[in-house]
Amino acid sequence: MPENDQERLATDLGAAVSQLMRHLRAASPQGELTPTQRAVISRIDTDGPATIAALARAELVRPQSMRLTVGALEERGVLARSPHPTDGRQVVFSLTEEGGRMLAAVRQAKQNWLAVAIADRLTTQEQQTLATATELMRRLMPE
């Protein structure tokens, strides 16, 4: 059972990570994509083409909601549909070149914001401490 110090640290760390994520989302090009749209194109970029049902399961939303998200991305030329390789009743969605460019721009904006914040707000010693903390955070993740 965690002690009070670990519980407080867990609460503080969770709050700091949440706040950092909000700032990273805000740093990406405004109006480009909603958080759900970013999650979908990132998932397709990482895992490859997917059906609406698979995306809905992965993002913990209803298929109807995912259909709207995917439809908006398809309309913008970010995603393209193609026949499912083994099930003719389904279609899969994959990232287009435009989608890849958009995702790269979003990721680059986030990385740039964070790199500038680290350089401007932290001393060299604090940056080394952050590098150590980053490795410790990786160790918290399940394998």
Image (cartoon, helix red, strand yellow):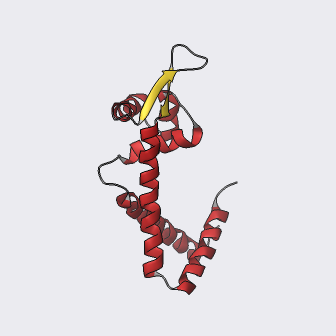
Q: Quadrant of the N terminus?
A: bottom right
Q: Is residue 31 left or right of residue 115?
A: left
Depicted 24 relative to depicted 136: above or below? above
Q: Quadrant of residue 139?
A: bottom right
Q: Quadrant of the C terminus?
A: bottom right
Q: Residue furthest right?
A: 143
Locate residue 47, reporting x and y percent. 58, 39
Locate residue 122, reporting x and y percent. 48, 82
Q: Quadrant of residue 98?
A: top left
Foreground residue among 57 and 67:
67
Foreground residue among 91 and 2:
91
Q: Quadrant of residue 71?
A: top left
Which residue appears at 43% of the width and 60% of the height?
110
Locate residue 88, reporting x and y percent. 54, 13
Which residue appears at 53% of the width and 41% of the height?
45
Which residue appears at 45% of the width and 58% of the height?
108
